[in-house]
Image: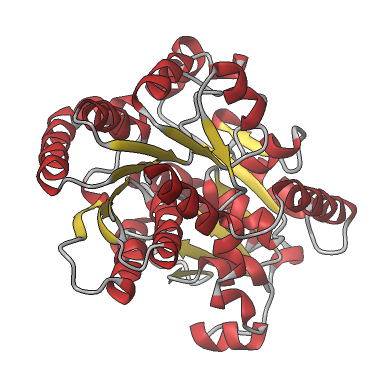
Amino acid sequence: MRYYLIAGEASGDLHASNLMRGLYAEDPQACIRFRGGDLMKAVYDESDKGTDGGLTTHYRQGAMMGIGEILRKAGQMSRNLRECKADIAAWKPDAVILIDYPGFNFPIAKFAHKKGFKVFWYIAPKTWASREGRNSKLRQYVDRLFIVFPFEIPYFTEAGVPFIYKGNPLLDAIQDSPALNRSRAEFLAAHGLEDKPFIAMLAGSRKGEISRMMPVLTEVVRRLGADPQFKDHQFLLAGAPARSEADYLPYIQGNERIKLIFGDTYGILKFAEEAVINSGTASLEAALIGTPQVVCWSTTGFNMFVALHILRIQDRIKYISLANLILDKQVFTELIQDAFTPENVIAELKSLTPGGERAARMQEDYAAMREVLGGGGASRAVAASIISLIK
């Protein structure tokens, strides 16, 4: 069968690549065409048998964050939508599979449904946080929603959106990662690092996130350089997929204590004493791997105004981090907007040092979260369900 997948950012690329593995395993004759990223392309290159599928557009060409950026790039978004719709109509897939990315995928869902294609949505849009009116579009245009968090079950049940829950695909990605099967010595040797403790820094996958995170993080590193507790620490900055060294150089050039590493985020998280992480999928990945962390998030004043006063997100959810939402408690601190300062980050890092009470309690919460999410196999189970629904 023919499957058309659309992912619009790094986390969607990860989940879609694992779903593609599941589709190829469940349907050996699968032909997959997609808008996505490098991980999806790697799966296609190793699995496809010379069909007319493949990557049409890389997600970096259309990645947007926040209302302001969407408004500035409205023309580009419109062109991308027209091209995608025309490609779907010409290629005639058995199913269109949308992975998160609601700003782009809702218009595609409406188009594909009206053209008579089966439409499946993997990784639900966060209507439980904002824009609840989109649930009517899910009911109208999507044949089945595939959710990945247990707390979404009662919400979408009450909303009347048909869904299937097969677990969380991040468990698959982490369990199957070769980076997590290496020793610390192998990790250090791979990156030419000294055998010293280090702190991980994940500044987000978009340029806007990096520009707001990095000035604070570099100041944190500067101040900790004069702190006896951290005088021997290294600081490893995990480069995001689809970003380049040029995105980080303005902030780290001349700072020898920060080492930028691409392509080994899981290795960095596994062997880090603790981590400072931009809110998003990376925070859940760190929790599943077991890295003590503080989550930080900052956006423009305009986007914050929209979130608080128009979307009223604070009225719907207590936390912005997935691990905190899953357990409905503050597993780790969230430093949001004005609270994201060098002083507050440093205070959190000092409180999470190995062997301390807070770090131990966090590990207990991580274990409880893994139990709630269940075992692996979600990606292939979703693939099997999609195939069954098509048939």
Q: Is residue 300 above or below residue 315?
A: below
Name which quarter of the figure residue 390 lies in: top left
Instruction: Work out which residue is located at the far front of the displayed protein and give it.
Output: 391
Task: Specify whether 271 is left or right of 261.
Answer: right
Task: Specify whether 4 is left or right of 131.
Answer: left
Instruction: Work out which residue is located at the far top of the displayed protein and give it.
Output: 309
Residue 225: percent from left, percent from top: 63, 64
Q: Residue at x 79, y 60 (%)?
A: 353
Q: Residue at x 33, y 70 (%)?
A: 42
Q: Is residue 333 above or below residue 248?
A: above
Residue 48: percent from left, percent from top: 28, 71
**What colouring style does the render use?**
secondary structure
Q: Looking at the image, which is closer to me, 303 or 232?
A: 303
Q: Is residue 250 above or below residue 303?
A: below
Name which quarter of the figure residue 303 lies in: top left
Residue 231: percent from left, percent from top: 69, 69
Task: Specify whether 169 is left or right of 62.
Answer: right
- Could one spot residue 198 in this view of the protein? no
Q: Residue at x 44, y 63 (%)?
A: 26
Task: Specify whether 32 is left or right of 213.
Answer: left
For the image, the number of numbered tags is: 0
- Could one spot residue 378 in this view of the protein? yes
Q: Residue at x 63, y 56 (%)?
A: 286
The N terminus: image quadrant? bottom left
Instruction: Work out which residue is located at the far right of the displayed protein and give it.
Output: 357
Residue 273: percent from left, percent from top: 71, 65
